[in-house]
Image: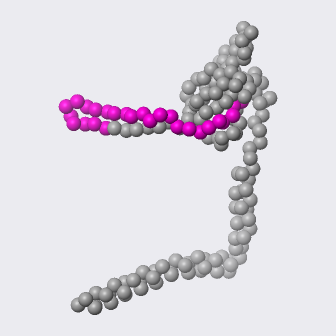
Amino acid sequence: MEAMYALVRTGGKQYRVSKDDTILVERISADEGAQVILDDVVMLGDGDKVTIGTPRVEGAAVSATVMRQTRGPKIIIFRRKRRKNHRRTQGHRQDLTLLKINAIAEDGKSLAPKAAPKKAAAPKTETKTEAKAAPKTAAAKKTAAKAEAAPKKAPAKKAAAKKTAAKKAAAKKS
């Protein structure tokens, strides 16, 4: 009996995958080690039983782990028009993601992704504390505005000092 496989569509391409396969796909925005769910399954196969989607198999999903974010080889695009002295060269490297397939399920609800690290939660709390620290009264807002405006005036004075020094140097030369 053949192992279960799936035909998954991602990045405009289709990939035939089974458990423990590694595939190189168009970039998926996820951190290394994160679990992603590919739910655009076109076909499922389990031995003699084959399920073909119209256009996709409803409820089916594939779980994968991001192994590495990488880039493809450099491709040179060279355009030329004969007898016109027209040449254009352009290079390109495609962003890619290496995925390791963990599981294939006909019922995608059983493949719940693991909780993401709480690194994203920390900046949200910082913005809340900054909002609390912001002045709330009109007088406090004016004072804060003056404090912000004062450092902006200081560089202007330095620039004026440089101009006077340049004038003094010009006067000494003549």
Q: Is residue 165 above or below residue 113?
A: below
| Position of residue 63 in the picture relative to residue 174 (left or right) | right
Report the quarter where the C terminus lies: bottom left
Q: Which residue is drawn at 73% across and 53% down?
A: 121
| Position of residue 102 in the picture relative to residue 160 (left or right) | right
Q: Residue at x 66, y 36 (%)?
A: 66
Q: In this view, does 79 lie above or below 143?
A: above
User: Percent position (x, y) of residue 154?
Assistant: 51, 81
Q: Residue furthest left?
A: 83
User: Percent position (x, y) of residue 33?
Assistant: 69, 39
Q: Is residue 42 visible?
A: no
Give the main secondary structure of the magenta stretch.
Answer: strand
| Position of residue 13 in the picture relative to residue 77 (left or right) | right
Q: Is residue 43 visible?
A: yes
User: Percent position (x, y) of residue 60?
Assistant: 72, 24
Q: Residue at x 59, y 39 (%)?
A: 69
Extent of the magenta region: 63-88
Q: Residue at x 60, y 23 (%)?
A: 15
Q: Is residue 30 above or below residue 126?
A: above
Q: Quadrant of residue 91?
A: top left
The reply to whether the magenta stretch includes residue 160 is no
Q: In this view, does 51 lie above or below 135?
A: above
User: Percent position (x, y) of residue 32?
Assistant: 66, 41
Report the quarter where the N terminus lies: top right
The reply to whether the magenta stretch includes residue 78 is yes
Q: Which residue lies furthest to the right in this view?
A: 110
